[in-house]
Amino acid sequence: MEKSQMYAEALLRMRSLQDKFNLNPMILQYLEEDMLLFSWHDLGVAAGCDMIDNDECYEEAVKEFEEKTGNFVYHVIEKKMWADAGEYQISSLENDVDEPVIMLTFLYVSHDAESWKEQRLNGDHLLAF
């Protein structure tokens, strides 16, 4: 699968997300300029976004995912989970209460174009990893 085809599909999906959820317009603008952003959340509310290459660990995680799967990541969402928040059960992880567990969600386009229709926004649901 050509990356250009996957990129075009990613733009389509991001425009759909932008229309449905009124996202920060910078996310789509940067994607149109072939730059990957990640969003972070604070208490479930989007707090901001930044370039993925500003965090070496995040950039490496995206690169590894794309190389292993052949998929194309078009946005990353960071979620910090605190051990003492009560809403998450992460006690089995070795983690200091003062440090969050960070989960990254990748919005991506599969290398399998035949499955794209099923992977697109459906109501409030979207395929992610």
Image (cartoon, rainbow, N blue to C red):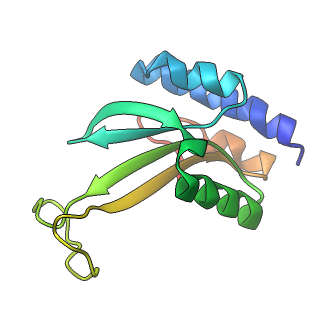
Relative to the observer, which residue lies in front, 53 or 18? 53
Relative to the observer, which residue lies in front, 11 or 41? 41
Residue depicted at x 17% and y 64%:
98
Residue 46, given in percent of the width and then of the height, sits at: 32, 33
Residue 83, given in percent of the width and then of the height, sits at: 17, 67
Residue 126, given in percent of the width and then of the height, sits at: 50, 42
For residue 95, above or below residue 6: below
Residue 91, given in percent of the width and then of the height, sits at: 19, 78
Relative to the observer, which residue lies in front, 49 or 4? 49
Would residue 38 appear left or right of 124 to someone viewing this image? right
Residue depicted at x 72% and y 30%:
34
For residue 44, above or below residue 60: above
Q: To which quarter of the image does residue 52 belong?
A: top right
Q: Is residue 4 visible?
A: yes
Count of numbered circles in the view: 0
Would residue 121 appear left or right of 112 to someone viewing this image? left
Q: Is residue 122 visible?
A: no
Q: To which quarter of the image does residue 61 belong?
A: bottom right
Residue depicted at x 44% and y 32%:
49
Would residue 86 appear left or right of 2 to someone viewing this image? left
Would residue 69 appear left or right of 36 to someone viewing this image? right
